[in-house]
Amino acid sequence: MKPPVAKREPKRREFHGDVFIDNYEWMRNKESAEVQDYVAAQNKYCEARMAHLAGLRGTLFEELKAHVEETDMSVPTRINDYWYFTRTQQGKQYGVQCRMPVRGADDWDPPVVDPQGAPGSMIGEQVVFDANAESEGHDFFRLGGLDLSHDGRWMLYGVDVTGDERYDFRIRDLDATLEQGRPVELPELFKGIGGACFTPDGQWVFWTEVDDSWRPCAIWRHHVGTPVESDVCVYREADERFWVGAGISFDERSIVIGTGSKTTTEVLMLPVSTPEGEFQAFIPRKDGVEYDVSFACFEGAGDHGEDVPLAVVYHNANNPNFEIDVVDMRAHKPPYRLGEGVCVAAGSPYGCEHGEPDRPITEAYFNPANPTILQGAHGLGIEGIALHKHFVALSYRADGQSHVAYTTKQAAAADFLAGRPWRFIELLPPPLENDWDMVAADRADSTGDHGERLWTEDGVEVDADGTSPAVLQNLPQSLPQDHTSSFDGASDDHLPGETRRLYSIGTGGNPSYEAPRMRYSFSSYTRPGELHEIDPATGVDTLLKRGKVLGDFDPRDYMERRVWITARDGERIPVSLVWRRDFPAQDSPMFITGYGAYEIASDPGFSVARLSMLDRGVLYAVPHIRGGGEMGRAWYEQGRRLNKKHSFEDFVDATRALQAAHLADPRRTVANGGSAGGLLMGAVANMAPECFAGIEADVPFVDALTSILDPDLPLTVTEWDEWGDPLHDAGVYEYMKSYTPYENAPEASDDAVCFPRIFITTSMNDTRVLYVEPLKWLARLQAAGVDAVAKIEVEAGHGGRSGRYKQWEEVSYENAWCLAVMHITR
């Protein structure tokens, strides 16, 4: 079966003296019959091409489903006077939000709830929001926000039923229902907005207007019980690079408006006691400076037992990798300035454009202001701090991974008042008993866990492109035949100090200032997520819930490690590898995925769907390429704007290194990326088609230059900080045109014959990457003779379909294609 033939309708695009003829720009008219017919024809073609994989898709879906506890619940979280939790039920697409009242002011132990029970089945249990009932009659449904008044009576919620990320918000009375059992709702409807929040008393709503380009551009004030038409605009952002949003401060004393571009932020505040007052900037914006502020106090720490009021300021005015300053607000009244107060933690400026660009990112960083645990860290980035009544939590990145540290509030107050570094303790997830990820007590190597190495069959070091030496680690003296036969498989990055297991860790689930214990969660590529609670005063760590994987799953059956390759410009790139222990990673089929944009880190995480690949002998690889945030701000800066090609080169060099080391077979290597990662996919397909048998590009940003040249399109102006401004800068235009996938797609020639097979996913209601980009790219690839197919969702947005069973079907569909390209068909 041949693909549909797209008509050619040449359109001339000329900028900076360069002319490009675009034959498929006509596809931008979404409502035209021609476009709709073309979409239908491509979906029919895709269905026919994928028909032979129906059995494998079904098998993968059933495997995934068999691993999941379909009827389950989350651990209750206390917010004000209720314990909130989510139930999932077998056969239901969506979770159900429920709550139970606390047993008293000092009730900090979650109630025992039957996880197999129906929503509302426990004594005192109330259903807050049932998305299954709310979604009836809609093919797509997404909850876009849910906020509650302090007393728990009023609920403000927003839903999206098309996927375009414009939400309709309503106000519901949780204490009242109609005779028919339907909830009581107020008449107000906030239609097609970006988001909304309550004041704690539930009497005022501050909501976000979205303009024609889908930019959150203004904040409006609404008095509950009055017509929406009488609402007042309290802030409008004139600079099109900036997005705005509104919320309530953690201490619930201030209404906060945050406005920011990719490189500059500003915070405006208003006391909740005067909601009709004027917002004031905490610190006026300064171009290129990002900051945030929160408020807390050291209870009873004053000279006479009084509270010490604090402003906690997070900013990059003096340090490109951010610092945290704590300001004693007794010193003087506002306004304050960035850099004022006591520096609690500061990131490494090494490699940063506005820091010390000539020093290597991986050089150990020492700063006398930093806590002991941060001394000597590599690629140190400070990510935030949270001050609660009984504890303080610090989040940071170092050595390419996320980290959390904690201290008691009492110790923090003593250190602050004494003018010394705070005594933080790093939070380390407990290892599994008898697992390979336990650190050996008798290690003789001081450069990494157990001296793990990456090597080749013949013991000869190889390079990324066959010409330059030493892209891999130093090889061991003797080489075992099995690439995975070392006893533990733990990582070794050859940086000074110890590199621990691969995992992601965070302190989510602590919405209450009064909580005496700190919750944290972590997961890895091989371990399902766990939720813990630690007492900062005693160090007692309690497991609250571990993700349950049904069947014969044992995390000890899988391996994960990090290796480092050297890219063509000499930078060392971390690469995470995951595989099943009884399938040696030796000329394996490989699924390699990446992102590398917006300073977003591709951190370790567990996936049930991934197990089906690993159990079939697939090596899973994640190159942590530049453009992401794995190694702090410098890592991001080296992969954006006029450095963007580093992202693509890093991915290609990592792929080549793994293949040259005989860990992966290029004839069975499939690459994957979505959105900005889809741009990555298109670029690496053009740069190194011989490395990939297939490429899955999800909602791919492949016509980036056309989009970034049009300031009227959604997101364009805000994206200039990320990619550069090709509309006004000829150098940026030329640079972008040299890598954008659409302009550089192969022509109908021998180039197309050796091009990887391409599988594209997109959604017609996507507002982040418009459907027209992958559609145009698809047409050009097919016209050149490339084997390319696309699955186009008619009712969905940037995140694909909604509902967990639909999402399981979607990932099974995609994975079946990937496995088939790897010659794995059952």
Image: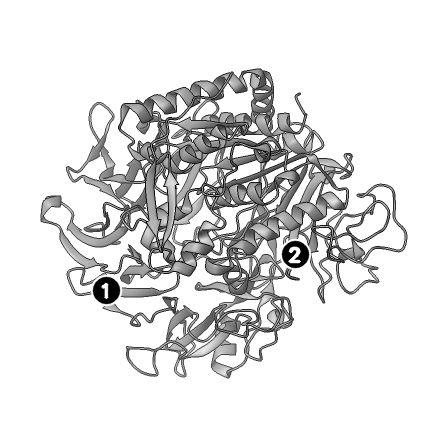
Quickly name the residue at label 1.
270
Residue 673 seen in the figure: yes
The residue lying at 53 percent from left, 20 percent from top is 50
User: As rendered, which of 50 and 747 lies closer to the eye?
Assistant: 747
**Element type where label 2 sits in the image:** loop
Tell me where residue 361 sits by quadrant: bottom right
Amino acid at circle 2: Ala
Contact, mark 2 vs mark 1 (Cβ under 8 Å)? no
**Element type where label 1 sits in the image:** strand
Quickly name the residue at label 2.
567
Relative to 527, say whether 373 is above or below: below
Relative to 582, say whether 624 is above or below: below
User: As rendered, which of 122 and 194 lies closer to the eye?
Assistant: 194
Q: Upstream in the sequence, badge 2 or badge 1?
A: 1
Relative to 811, say whether 676 is above or below: below
On screen, residue 228 versus residue 101, left or right, reads left
- Mark 2 and mark 1: Cα distance apart in space: 49 Å
